[in-house]
Amino acid sequence: MASIFTRIIRREVPAHIVAEDENYLAFLDILPLARGHTLVIPKKEVDYVFDLDDETLSGLHIFSKKVAQAIRKAIDCKRVGVAVLGMEVPHAHIHLVPMNSMSDINFSNTKLKLSSEELAGIAAKIRDSFQHV
C-alpha cells in the first residue's frame, strides 16, 4: 500500500506544496511545530532515509537546502532546523523547521493548528521565495 506521501505525490491527497522537481517534493506539515514547517521527500518511495541510494540521498539534501533557503526568506526566523526522524510515515523525509531558539524544534512541543487558508498563505510565500533561490 502506498504511503500517504506517495499519495500526495500522485495528487490523490491534497497538500500545500512549496517546491517540486522531477525527483523531490516539499510540502507544509499540517501539524507544524512552527509556521513554515516543511517536509521534503524523494518521489521514490523508500521507507528509511539511509536506505536511499547515494544519488537520491544527496539529491534530497541539495533540494532541501534550496527549500530551507526559501523558507528563511519567507518566514521570519534565525535558522531553519533539520530533523530526520522517519518513524511517523514509512517514506523517507526531512523536516525543515523555522527556528528562533533550540526549543522550536522539539517534537514534543504542542503542534500549531493552522487553518487551510493560513497554510495556503504560508505555502505561497515559500513558493514565491523558492523561485528566487
Image: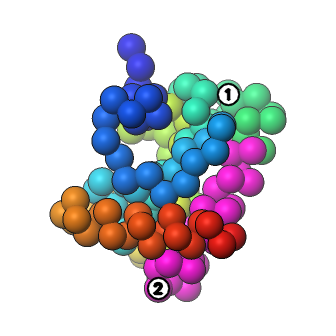
Query: In the drawing, what numbered circle is on residue 76?
Result: 2
Choose the circle earlier in sequence order: 2 or 1: 1
Is 13 placed above or below 1 here? below
> Does residue 87 appear left or right of residue 119 in this picture?
right
Residue 89 position within the rendered picture, expressed as x and y whole percent measured from the top left: 41, 34
Q: Amino acid at mark 2?
A: Asp
Q: Amino acid at mark 1?
A: Asp
Q: Are marks 2 and 1 in contact (CB under 8 Å)?
A: no
Q: Residue furthest right?
A: 55
Q: Residue at x 56, y 72 (%)?
A: 129
Within-10-Å neighbours for mark 1: few <14, some 14–19, many 20+: few
Q: Nearer the viewer, residue 26 or 96?
A: 26
Residue 93 position within the rendered picture, expressed as x and y whole percent measured from the top left: 54, 43
- Indicate yes or no whether the magenta region holds residue 70: yes
The secondary element bearing badge 1 is classed as helix
Q: Considering the image in quadrants, where does the C terminus appear?
A: bottom right
Query: In the drawing, what numbered circle is on residue 51?
Result: 1
Q: Nearer the viewer, mark 2 or mark 1?
A: 2
Q: Residue at x 60, y 27 (%)?
A: 44
Residue 121 in view in this figure: yes
Residue 109 position within the rendered picture, expressed as x and y whole percent measured from the top left: 30, 66
Q: Nearer the viewer, residue 18 or 1?
A: 18
- The kind of secondary structure the magenta stretch mainly shows is helix
Stretch in magenta: 59-81
Residue 68 in view in this figure: no
Q: Residue at x 73, y 39 (%)?
A: 57
